[in-house]
Image (spheres, rainbow, N blue to C red):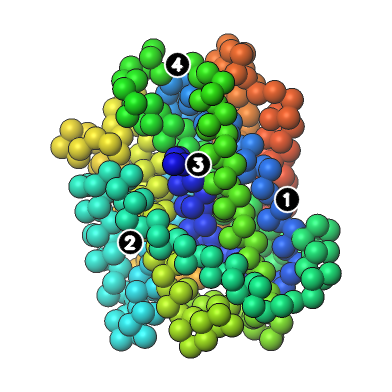
Amino acid sequence: MLGPGLITGASDDDPSGIGTYSQVGSHFGYGLLWTALFTFPFMVAVQELCARIALQTGVGLGMSLKRKFPRWIVGLCIAALFAANTINVGADLGAVAAGGSMLSRGLVPRLWLLLPVAAAILILELFLTYAAIFKIFKWLTLVLFAYVITGFIVRPDLRQIFMASVVPHLELNKEFIAALMAIFGTTISPYLFFWQASSEVDEMRAAGKLTEAKRRGVNVAELRAARTDILIGMFFSSLVMYFIMFTAAAVLHAHGKTDIQSADQAAQALAPLAGPFAFVLFAGGMIGTGLLAIPILTGSAAYAIKDFFGLKGALADKPWQRPTFYGIITLSTLAGLGLNLLDIDPIRALFIAAVINGLVAAPLMVLIALLGSDGEVMGRRRSGRLSQVLTWTATAVMAVAAVAFVAELVVA
């Protein structure tokens, strides 16, 4: 019954998220559990704003930004988005291939699976709608609840967990700042902004509102439904995020495994639930979320670029109808495939992708927050006080984290 918000929430826990949260939990223990509760209202506020902009204007986020701000500023942001998405695609492709290799117990090397995985995803995107892809692979995301079950099995000190969840723990060192940047980047990811808005437009098109004029304007009932959808989707995402960090801390960090460098090591977080078959659950989660997230990553880049250049195209269209739109998707997928030739471990690559998303997010969030508060664009649906406080606070948090991360790199 739910729509774009649930899909967005499910894709937010992509392999980049699983890899990042696993590494953070194993390295810092319970020290960053508070970030799940901290980021939740910001996730909801930013995604709600992106949805509201699309529902009110009737066009995608790229188109709305281009109409309001200087073309060169929007162009730079979209170019950065495309680069970040492509790097994320490469990391997620490597993770899906690593998951397949794990299921074969290493008999089939990861590099051998990269091309078949990329080809399979392109075939799905070219010949199926994303709604059909979601119906097929959404069940694999249920594997992520294995982390929730494991969290209850390990029976940690509840007082310690409560304090770690509500009292922020901060450290002024390079590793900690990078971990925060990665968490923020994989949780409040730029590609989700464009995906949310474009998905709302596609839903309106599917409902028969084929022209921009017919789509423009949103009533209270439609806005309430979108907000409920987003709230549930972001709650699902935050719940899984919390328990991935929690189980990695309880199972890996507590036993001295603080520097996981491979998928096999990360999979051991599920050992209390699945024992020697923990790799099956971990691999299933990586494969399922990757197959959902990669089309969203490439699709959101295609939506942003086609809006910027005034092109047409949507995932509901056929490839031969919109070859340019699908050409962008293919280019992003192939570029991501090429990045895997750099021979970076998939788990490390996932962390790097999260950091890059965090660096790209802040400039885009400034433009989106300004757009949402503009009375000429949004009319009576412009951001209220609560929305403005949350979105600008989220923007400030992302900007401060990015500046601190860059400053650490320069000093080092």
Q: Earlier in the sequence, mark 2 or mark 1?
A: 1
Specify few, some or many for label 4: CA neighbours under 10 Å numbering under 14, 14-19, or 20 or more: some
Q: Amino acid at mark 4?
A: Arg
Residue 163 at x, y percent in the picture: 83, 64
| Residue at image mark 4 | 216
Q: Position of residue 58 (x, y in %)?
A: 43, 21
Residue 340 sits in which quadrant? bottom left
Of helix, strand and loop, which one carries label 2?
Answer: helix
Q: Is residue 47 above or below residue 243?
A: above
Q: Earlier in the sequence, mark 1 or mark 3?
A: 3
Marks 2 & 1, CB-CB < 8 Å contact: no
Q: Which residue is mark 3?
A: 5
Residue under the image location 72 percent in, 73 percent down:
29
**Camera-side residue of 80 and 149:** 149
Check disc 3 and report its element: helix, strand or loop.
Answer: helix
Query: For the N terminus, which image quadrant?
Result: top left
Label 3 crowd bin: few (<14), some (14–19), many (20+), radius 10 Å: many
| Point 29% across, 27% down: residue | 312
Q: Position of residue 95 (x, y in %)?
A: 42, 68
Instruction: Give the number of the disc on residue 38.
Output: 1
Of the two numbered discs 1 and 3 in the rendering, the one whose residue sits closer to the viewer: 3
